Image (cartoon, grey):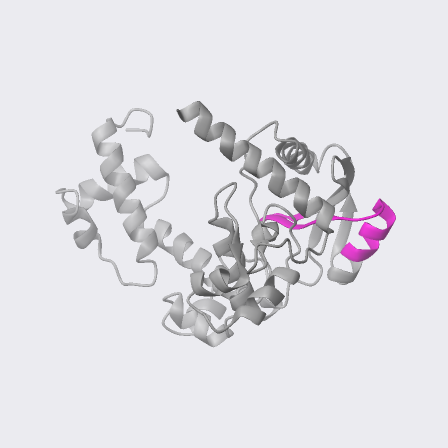
Amino acid sequence: MTMSKASDQTLCKFIEVARYIAAQADQSLTLETLAQRVHLSPSRFQRVFKSIFGVSPKKFQQAARSDRFKALLRAGTDITEAIYEAGYGSSSRVYGQPMHGIGMTPKRYRAGGKGETLNWACRDTVLGPLLMAATDRGVCFAQFGGDCVALQAQLRAEYPHAELKAYDGESSAQLDHWIDAFNAYIQSKQPRPDIPLDLQGTAFQIKVWEFLLSLRDGDVISYSELAQGIEKPRAVRAAASACGANRIAVLVPCHRILRGDGGLGGYRWGLERKRALLDAERARSRKSVSDAG
């Protein structure tokens, strides 16, 4: 059986099991326990799972555990704490085997991956020059500026130890597509693009940025509401600081934060850009409501 040949009902059941495995990546899951969820024998369950997903349930869980471990490291979690929180049980389980796609030691990874390669490109947009850079995990830098020379210097300052590779039309083809989608979005020609992001910051900063990513087009909130949204109501100033540290313009929508009195407040890329972005999002939101009606 292949994924295309599996019945819709079987496929749905196994997708639910896969989601369960990913959610329980830090737990010890037996084949018997998983098989019971779809009322199959362990051997039959293993065959069907592998035919659909291409790997065994054990390998699938290992990949999910590795993803969780890497996310914890990127969020600034202590290495030892990340090892146990991801479900490895001991440091030897990590250091004694290949790093499941990290490609470097946990310490180096957590430090931002010195020697890492970033592909970048700079383009003119309706909001001025934009430089976008990405690792192999997604966009890590998208900023507006006065010109591409200044933006490249800013990128170098942010990633002084990385290898920076300018757009060459081949190895950077995906980046080219993302910039086009980004520009179409800010011109209100397309919906928000589904661009992968490589969020690099402290655990608190990432919590703030992920909350901002949950906001819908046209929504605006205050810094107090942002702090409440991340369940840190007293951390208003820290939440504002996390917005100021955001390296990814628009895609992490810190422009949706207003002052408590409804004023625009600040914006690291300029109030004219902030106003233009909010006006475009409000127009899209009104059009959506009108179309639905």
Residue 26 in view (yes/no):
yes
Residue at image coords 59%, 65%: 240
Q: Residue at x 50, y 32 (%)?
A: 286
Q: Magenta residues, as a range? A: 134-155
Tally of marks:
0
Of residues 203 and 4, the one drawn nearer to the viewer in this rendering: 203
Q: Is residue 98 visible in this depiction of the protein?
A: no
Residue 167, position as x, y percentages in the image: 77, 39
Q: Quadrant of residue 202?
A: bottom right
Q: Quadrant of residue 187?
A: top right
Is 277 above or below relative to 236? Answer: above
Relative to 160, say whether 288 is above or below.
above
Q: Judge by depth and name the residue closer to the eye, 209 or 281.
A: 281
Q: Position of 251 compared to 121: left or right? A: left
- Quadrant in the picture for the C terminus: top left
* Magenta stretch holds residue 260: no
Q: Nearer the viewer, residue 35 or 119?
A: 119
